Image (cartoon, rainbow, N blue to C red):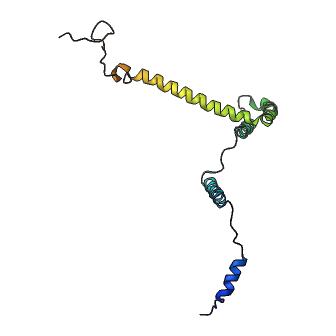
Amino acid sequence: MSEELPPPETGAREAADEVPVTDADAWATACAEDLEAEQDRRRARYGPPPGSAAEELRKLVDAVADKLSDLQSPLLGAVAGPAAQQMVRQVVQQAKAAVEPVIERNPDVFDHLAAAGGELLAAYRSAVQAQERRWTGRADDPAEDLGEPRDRGEGTGPGQHIDLD
């Protein structure tokens, strides 16, 4: 053995002089590290997460502006083409100039509008599904749920059949 161990009494004095360094909030630190690692893994797998509704609106306006600016109209011909493109660019710039201040002043409004739109879509979907169930079948008939048979057109009225025997 090439390593020599220090005498036992020297190690005891050094251990008594050293103050163990502990993290007061080790659990929070470990959780933060795990969360950061998970976020990095998700970014690598799925790409960057979507931004706020205001950022997404800004991206949409920019994308539409780029597409409209690049659009060439074959219907106007070669003579009116450059003038039409200049007019489209001017309209796009005016629209961007009108939208940008609104986005800058009220970014939270767009988040609320996006959430409200999601709620409206869910309410509409629920209403349509309920109506489709009524149209497609009578399996959800409340009288059948109670075990009461209904007259299905055998008699003259909407009442129930009563057996008199």
Q: Residue furthest top?
A: 156
Quadrant of res 149: top left
Q: Residue furthest left?
A: 165
Q: Nearer the viewer, residue 61 or 79?
A: 61
Q: Position of residue 41 (x, y in %)?
A: 61, 56
Residue 109 shows in the view: yes
Q: Residue at x 34, y 22 (%)?
A: 146
In the rendered view, does 96 fall on the left or right side of 116?
Answer: right
Q: Residue at x 75, y 36 (%)?
A: 107
Quadrant of res 117: top right
Residue 13, placed above or below residue 56: below
Residue 154, placed above or below residue 31: above
In the rendered view, does 154 fall on the left or right side of 69?
Answer: left
Quadrant of res 81: top right
Q: Position of residue 6 (x, y in %)?
A: 66, 89
Q: Nearer the viewer, residue 82 or 90?
A: 90
Q: Residue at x 32, y 7 (%)?
A: 157
Look at the image and tell me in which quarter the N terminus lies: bottom right
Q: Position of residue 126 (x, y in %)?
A: 51, 27
Residue 125, placed above or below residue 10: above
Look at the image and tell me in which quarter the C terminus lies: top left
Q: How many marks?
A: 0
Residue 111, placed above or below residue 6: above
In the rendered view, does 155 fall on the left or right side of 133?
Answer: left
Q: Position of residue 76 (x, y in %)?
A: 74, 28
Q: Nearer the viewer, residue 135 or 98?
A: 135
Residue 79 shows in the view: no
Q: Residue furthest bottom?
A: 1
